[in-house]
Structures are given as C-alpha cells and as structure tokens.
Image (cartoon, rainbow, N blue to C red):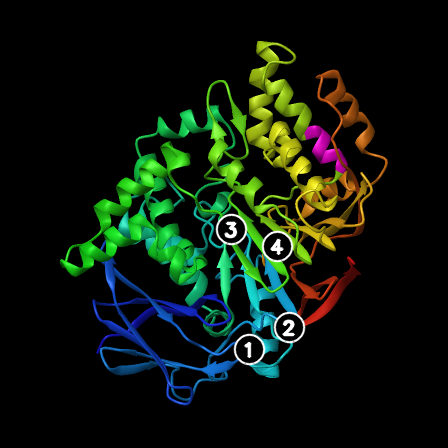
Amino acid sequence: MTALVLGPLLRHVADRTATIWVETDRPCEVRVFSEEHGVDASASTFTAHGHHYALVDLEDLAPGATIPYAVALDGERVWPEPGGPFPAPVIRTIDPSGPVRISFGSCRRSPDRAGLHGLDALSAFAHRLAASGAGDSASPDVLLMVGDQIYADELGEEMRAYLAERRAPGTEPEGEVADFEDYTMLYKLAWCDDPAVRWLLSTVPTYTIFDDHDVRDDWNTSYTWRRQMWAKPWWRARITGGIGSYWIYQHLGNLSPEQRAAEPLYAKVLAAAADGVDAAEIIDEFAERADKEPATTRWSYVHDWGGTRLIVVDSRCSRLLTADRRGMLDDDEFQWLDEQCQGGRDHLLIASSLPYLLPRAIHHAEAWNEAMSGGAWGGRAARLGEKLRQGADLEHWAAFDASFRAVAEDVVAVARGERGDAPASISFLSGDIHYSYLARVTEPSTRTAITQVVCSPLRNPLVGRFRWANKIACSRVVPGPFRLLARLSKVAPPPLKWRITDGPWFDNAIATVELDGRRCRVRWETPRDATSLTGMGTATIC
C-alpha cells in the first residue's frame, strides 16, 4: 500500500481555490476529496532524487466555507488516520468581506527531545486550535512562517544519528547537512515528528519564506562570504540541495494555482514525470543558477485578501552581491517590490524574514559596519569589518543602506497617498532575531500607522550573554555611540525615525495580526505548557 511520507500540508488558499501538498513513498495518484461538499480533485506525483511529491489544486470552492477533506493514494484512503486524537482536517476558504487573521513566527528547532530550546509555541498553538475546533471562526486564516523552518547547520541528535549512518566520520561538512537527501530528512523531522504540528499544517493554510539557517548561517552575508563558500568542494551539493528542496517543500505551495502553472520549472518537472523521468538534474541545474544568478528566479510573492495585501519578500537568495555593488534585493527584485507597494487597500503587510526596523543601536552599528567593510576607514579596517560582519551577523536591512532607503521611499509614498488611497496601516512582519517587539515610525508623520512587528522564535530562545546584549541594545540610551560611529563613516541619518513601544520579549512565541476593516491589532503569545498558550503582549496598531 502506498503511504504518506509527509503531509498533507494545506498551502495556498483563496476564496475559491485551495492547494494540498504531499510527499509519498512511491509514485502514485493523489486524490483529495470531500464527499459532503462534492469536492474531488487528483494529481499524479513527480519524482526528484528518488522522492515523490504532488500538489493537488481544488477549484470552484465556496467562499467562506469550512470543508472537511480526506486524502487517498491510488484509491486507498490514508488521511485522516482513523482514531487519531485531533479533529478531521478542514479547508477554510477566504471570505473576501470578512476579517483576516495572520499568525506568524520564525526560528523553530524541532525535534528537541532533550528540551534544550524550551516549549514549542507552534505545537502549543496547534493543541489550542484543536481543542477549540479547526473550523472555529477565530482560527487564523493564514500561518506565515518567516524563516528558519529548518536548521541545516545546527543539528539535533536525530539528524546527527542519521548523518552518522550516511557518511564516514570526518566527511565534510561535519555536523551539517550535505545534499538534497539530507534536507528531505530535515523537513520530515520538522513537520512530521510532532503529531499536533502535523495536524496543524494539514488544516491551516501555510505560507513560508526562507532565512539563512534553511541553507546555512550567514547565507549571502556578503560578496566575500559567497567567494569563501564556493571555494569549498562540498558547497555545490549543499546549495543545490538547499535551494532545490526549498523549491519543492516550501516555495511551490506559496503560489496560487495560476502562479504555479506559469512557472517554467514546474512545467519541466511535470513533463519529466509524464515521461517517467526523475527531475533531479533539472532541479539541480535550476538551483545552481538561482544561486549564481539571482535575477533568474523570484522567490517573493504577493497575495490579496479583501482589503489586505500581503507581500512576502525574499531577503536572502535575491541579494545583489558583487565586487562593486551591494543590495538586499537585486534590481529586478526591487522593481517588483516597488510595483507591489501600492495604496488603495485598508492594510499593506510586508513580510521579510529579517526585520526592517531594528533596535536603533543595532541599526546604527550595522550601517557603520557596512561602511567600514566598504573601505570608509581604509583597507585594514575593511578586512576587520568583514570579520565583524560575519561573526556578529551584521547583515540585516540596516547593513544594506541603499536598499533600506529605497524601501523607506516606497513606504512613505504609499502612506502619503501618492500611490492610491493611503492604507490605515503598513506593517513589516519579521522574525530572525530571537526576540519579539513592536516598533512604530514616528517621523515622517503620516495618517498611516507604519510599524515593525517582530515575532521570534517559535522555539529557539536567546540565552545568557546574547539575551543581555540584545536587551541593552533595545534601551533608549545606547544608540548614541553607534550613531556617532555611523556618522564618522559618512553614513547619512536614516530617512525614518522609530522607537520600540512594546517589548522586547525573549520567550518562545507566536503572534497573530488581526485585520478588520480599517482596524489592525496584534497579540503575542508564549507557551504556558506543552498544550496551551498565555498572553505576552497586545497592541492596537490602528
């Protein structure tokens, strides 16, 4: 009997369509159906590196409906499993006239049998949702995972044991994954190990974007970093495995059926499947080109739900890093983002794994470091600056000053009504830094509330001196010396002013943004125990 390896994952959902993703243990026909609602759709698997995947698109659904569903492989029903402890999975289509709830977070270490990383906010969230009923009107419409869904370079005991069976001791890269096959195990452990999380991913639409640990710490920090990594003999298999697996496990499900159908690579992979060919070579070639020529691929995407627009920005793979130019986004990617930043909506959300608005001390430190690494203080200081950049992870938006200013110009134009009616709020949604807060833009003053909402980690808290250092950095008295260093490096003052008004909080957490008409509020919650959450903070944005 054909079996599920991973999934089903409920991915893109709109008012009339939904997508189910699965991995199976052999080639098969995947059927998703709801007898009660007359829903029935099928798709054949495609194969990559000996693994088998399918995305099944359901169409002509009713808006605002709650649809229980089941999955069959080659005619045998495999999901939901009989006698399971969780409710039957459902698809809740979007009601364009209703409120939108987006739950989000980042940085989740799983599994964690030794309990090194605290209680899992995503698992506790799943248990609470299961207890209240998956079709409950207060359930999130979207689960947004803003980076570090897996840790390819900081491995748990299960993954280390798996690698010990695959590779001889001393084989590079030691203590890290090496190829596509290793990545498939990381995803299986992250998404299938906890039954509550597996159920959650089957019943709440999930969108993702990668951050560095999905590939490797400091991924694309600088031009120097890229040169150092490509000099390593094992890097090609690592980067192609990381990007290729991301395309399958994460990216494809971010897209609507129409967007996915327009992807040339997806068409090639399906054509290979029709011919009975493993698409490994096709995907590996694509992945290598995506890394070496970022402008050839777009990982960012946009979705509109009623009066809300969500723009999810790739701030990792699409960087512009050459010997003479540096940008958080390459030229084509920034032009795309510029085109998406429009008014005429109630709310504009811009999700980036890396916070756009950091604590001011860290912002000035990163801007100074970029100038120093670029030669503002001479060649010797530039080499020191590069070491600091990689050692201290100084590679957020603030470390790409030109990109930071370009985005500020776009956001302010939208807030001033220069690109259509001004929205009530513009919010950046981010993770990465392992603590949570709300920052509000204070200048320039506009009628639109411009904020940075950070929620991190789901399960990987800062400890010891790292926590204390970041607490100090968030205080109002610390930015002065770093602002002076930036000015001495001829960095112009930022075009925005902002301050942290809520937080920082350093516990594992998940946040929910609630958008209803012209109102927007956010709440952060942290696990009280393994199966429940307690409030950590709430804020009204507008």
Cα gap from disc 3 to disc 4, whole angstroms: 9 Å
Say if 282 sits above or below 114 in the image: above
> Is 505 on the left or on the right of 104, as rendered?
right
**Mark carried by residue 98:** 2
Q: Which residue is mark 4?
A: 457
Mark 2 vs mark 4, foreground winner is 2
Q: Which residue is mark 1?
A: 64
Q: Which residue is mark 3?
A: 148
Range shown magenta: 360-365
Mark 2: which secondary structure? loop
Crowd band around label 2 with a 10 angstrom C-alpha radius: few (<14), some (14–19), many (20+): some
Mark 3: which secondary structure? loop
Q: Earlier in the sequence, mark 1 or mark 2?
A: 1
Report the predominant secondary structure element of the magenta stretch: helix
Is residue 170 among what the camera can see?
no
CB atoms at circles 3 and 2 under 8 Å apart? no
| Residue sitting at x 55%, y 34% | 328
Say if 349 sits above or below 52 in the image: above
Cα gap from disc 1 to disc 4, whole angstroms: 31 Å
| Residue sitting at x 48%, y 62% | 111
Check disc 2 and give the amino acid type: Gly
- Indicate yes or no whether the magenta region holds residue 405: no
Where is residue 367, by image quadrant? top right
Q: Earlier in the sequence, mark 3 or mark 4?
A: 3
CB atoms at circles 1 and 3 under 8 Å apart? no
Cα gap from disc 1 to disc 3, whole angstroms: 31 Å
Is residue 388 among what the camera can see?
yes
